[in-house]
Image (cartoon, coloured by chain):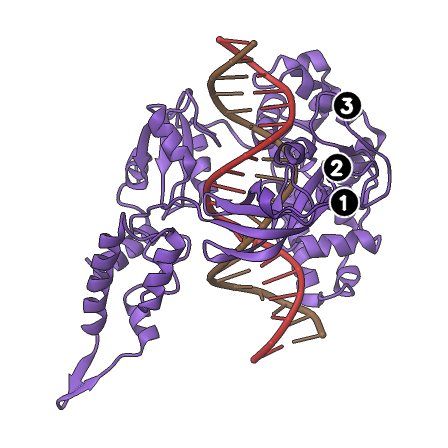
Chain colours: A purple, B red, C brown
Amino acid sequence: MKSQYEALEAVKQAGFPVNPNIMLCRDISEVIEYCRRWEEKRNSLDYEIDGMVVKVNEIEKQKILGFTGKSPKWAISYKFRAETAKTKLTGITVQVGRTGALTPVAELEPVKIAGTTVKRATLHNEEYLEKKDVRGGDFVFVEKAGDIIPEVTGVSLPDRRKGLKKFKMPDKCPVCGEKVFKYEDEAIRRCINIKCPAIVEGSIFHFGSRDAMDIEGLGNALVKQLVSSGIAADIGGLYELDVFKIANLERMGVKSAEKLIENISKSREKDLSNLIYALGIRNVGKQTAEVLADEFGDIEKIVSADEKRLAEIDDIGPIAAKNIKDFFALPETKQILEKLRGAGVNMKQKKKKAKDARFKGLVFVFTGELEKYTRGEAQNIVKSMGGKTSSSAGKNTTYVVAGENPGSKLEKAKKAGIKVVDEKEFLGMIGESRGGKNAESKKKNKEDTLF
DNA sequence: GGCAGTTGATGCAAGCACGA
DNA sequence: TCGTGCTTGCATCAACTGCC
């Protein structure tokens, strides 16, 4: 077998439960062994009455054995080399993100890779385009990095027709039509029109995202409608919405509108760090927002801090400091803050510093899927115990916690000699080696299921 | 009931800020 | 100057919700 997908297909063809994201075993012999044992267990569920064999419905069997649509979480995962496919690049479109960044995207003739159909893939920026020399009409090689993200890895030059022109990035924003800028030290072009619908939509969507103000129900499609209909011109406008306005939008009703209003209302109580992150300041992500909130404790103090004071803070350099200062100096920012203040949005830090300091000085990186916690929850636990988390493994990383189906971080960690622990060990470290209710039931399920 | 939108989850690459 | 790590942007999927 050449790929993980082929192996999974073979297992599925044989009628066994698999999750397309997870290869169950280390190699094919283990897959076969797994299937054999599953078959035995499955057959054992049938029973006899008066000498007649009663076959239990397959779906019931899967429920009884704990396979409700997913593979067993505890199964060992294994990755095959990424599968490559050749397909036609029908065109290159340009997207505008919330920061105004123009990103070229490859539009592809749909092609099946690793069990899913790939239609688009990012081309990052014009330098990347230049390097790969990708042109509309080319046949390109596509693979899925980490079996998840589609990537154009190269062009099939023998298939190139004559006369295909190089793609040129537009000088004007494809959304608002304003002139775009490319700063000398940056690889990307940006639309700097703060009224550009793409930027407005992006910033409202970002404001409501989970790590920001966590407004459930504020999805992409709804935000588009809010902006295009003029109901919300900026993030401050969210707090002026009412049920009637929302319920009249496409695919919205009174029930959804009421829920959304309730969720927007709840967001007023979010912590200062959430608000700072939600504002979408350049170079200020979740981590930096937390640093700022911890340092100042009040948005007013951040607004009035000068660049020098900001740059004195750990993890904030002169560029981030300038961006922060510039952002709060904008009249539009002042207006938005005024609206938010008027709407009763919390602007002070409520979180207290961690009392439990058992992870003080330790840096954790998570890869793969954990059984008991989401990654966000696990990161919060580490922070509550005085530790730090990071999205990439480096020399400062103390532990890499590897869950199911880990990514490249695991390999990187092993090479760098970083200590790798599994979920069980991590739970032991946080004093939950026996696990909670959820973990108990899952554990039981696992034990009852097969081996 | 069908359909569309949202949520919540995953990982990778590139760019770039920061600090040693 | 360079290594490290944060930020951003991207695609996909299953499960769920609620409108039509």
- Is A379 located above or below residue A36 in the figure? above
A86 or A366, nearer to the observer: A86
Q: Looking at this view, name the residue that lies furthest to the left.
A: A51
As shown in the figure, which amino acid type bears the numbered disc 2?
Answer: Gly
**Disc 2 or 3, which lies upstream in sequence?**
2
Give the alpha-carbon distance from disc 1 to disc 2, as whole Å: 8 Å
Q: Would you say A192 lies left or right of A7 here?
A: right
SS label for mark 3? helix
Is residue A425 toward the left or the right of residue A87 in the image?
A: left
Q: Mark 2 points at which residue?
A: A100
* Mark 2, secondary structure of its residue: loop
10 Å crowding of disc 3: few (<14), some (14-19), many (20+): some
**Circle 1 is placed at which residue position?**
A198
In three-dimensional space, the C-alpha distance between marks 1 and 3, rounded to whole angstroms, equals 21 Å
Measured along the vertical axis of the image, is residue A254 above or below residue A192? below
Query: Is the Cβ of the residue at disc 1 closer than 8 Å to that at disc 2?
Result: yes
Secondary structure at numbered mark 1: helix
